[in-house]
Image (tube, helix red, strand yellow):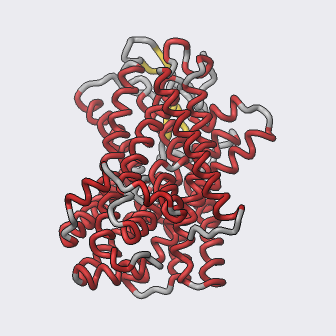
Amino acid sequence: MRERGCLGKRTALRHRRADGKSRRSCYPSLDQASLFQCKSFPAENGRESTARLKQVETSLLKIHRGYVDPGNWATGLEAGAKYKYELLSIILLANLMAMVLQHLAVRLGILGEIDLAAATRKHLKSPWVWVPMWLLAEVAIIACDLAEVIGGAIALKLLFGVPVVLGILITVLDVLVFLSGIGSRGFRPLELVIVVLVAIVGGCFGIEVWLAKPEYPSIFRGMFLPDLSVFQEQHALFVSLGIIGATVMPHNLYLHSGIVQHRLGMEPPREAVKLATWDSSIALFLAFLVNASILITAAAGLSSVNSITSLEDAASLLGKALGPGAAILFALALLASGQSSTISGTLAGQIVFEGFVRLPISPWKRRLITRTLAVAPALFVVMLYGEQKVNEMLLWSQAVLSVQLPFAIIPLVIFTADQSFVGEDNLAPKALTVVGWTIALVLIALNMWMLIMQFGFGVEVM
């Protein structure tokens, strides 16, 4: 049997696979002190089928939450305000990229029975190689959490007048929410709260789009027939890469390859891959609707200002353009999006840490570490440069995700085409591998060009 991606406690329980063979399975659960626990799956009947549906629902929501966070807001609002509907094509392209890469993550998790972090550690045996890979993955998680910190702080200021510095400190308290959510009653109560938060985000922006009365022919052109000349601008490239980073998000590849393993034993492996791919694709489609709504709202209501200097300004301008209710909806959705991304960030952090370092870590410790590392730079920038720099920090946090993406994509493409990981009969189709390599190489080229423009010749992209 191949080396498994099951870390932490290794209670070797057996269960029957859908094809009749006995097999051990590991999947992440916040109900436990460590992320990975080996558990048994019952045969499918009435109540067990319902339990299975809940597992699938939970998987979908964890992924979806990660794709709708304040980082998407910053890039979407900036794109809509400055370029109207032209960068809708980038949101569409980024979602298609994410669907391909999430499918590869599914293949690795189910067919290889190992998550991306554990596979990378297994393949890269030298600490001089795997330690930098681990640190890069951690930086991406912290960058995403930084966006949640800033978004939550700004939302608190918009709703209650709380200063941004105090709001940043208040966001640390979500660790306590985590602790209460994973107590004796398990993860389900917290999961229900997150469902409500995600619904609030989608509902708020659905109403915002309706209030904005956008130009639907322009939406179609921006989505499918964009003006390519806009991409000659350095800032457009910067925002586009931010959109890709905020949409694909490298830590979600680690996350999905881990949590998808709960399907082991539920159905035959190929069927499990198919169903899990549908799960993630539906989640990405829902996220696409929300993220496109953010850009469309900005394009219709904020295009006259040319560029967004802060999320506060965006809320104020939306209130003036669409009515005071729009500003309140904006703030509520911003707060909900930041909080709803908390779970996926913590799960991804656990998978990355346990996979690379091979040591178990409890959810609240992981959450506290990540949030502390995210709060520090946020406080530093706000106290040193003022609140007007917050939006720049949000945009840069998403650009960091884009820069880190190839370091997650390339190993993923390699492992899914390597029979030592997935077996000779489960190799990814060559066309899929080519698409994966193309995505990685294009991102490398664009990121290098962006960095050269920013740092190589002193040319500003902000």
Q: Is residue 48 above or below residue 34?
A: above
**Residue 57 location (% of width, % of height):** 32, 42
Front residue (pair 193, 219): 219
> Which part of the image, by quadrant, shows the C terminus?
bottom right
Q: Is residue 202 above or below residue 460?
A: above
Front residue (pair 8, 317): 317
**Residue 54 location (% of width, % of height):** 31, 40
User: Can residue 193 be seen in the rendering of this structure?
Assistant: no
Residue at the extreme front: 229
Count of numbered circles in the view? 0
> Which part of the image, by quadrant, shows the N terminus?
top right
Q: Is residue 41 left or right of residue 213?
A: right
**Residue 376 location (% of width, % of height):** 65, 72
User: Can residue 154 be seen in the rendering of this structure?
Assistant: yes
**Residue at the spot 35% in from the left edge and 39% down from the top edge:** 281
**Residue at the spot 69% in from the left edge and 69% down from the top edge:** 458
Front residue (pair 174, 271): 271
Q: Is residue 12 left or right of residue 337?
A: right
Q: Quadrant of residue 180?
A: bottom left
**Residue at the spot 42% in from the left edge and 88% down from the top edge:** 161
**Residue at the spot 45% in from the left edge and 38% down from the top edge:** 102
**Residue 304 location (% of width, % of height):** 33, 78
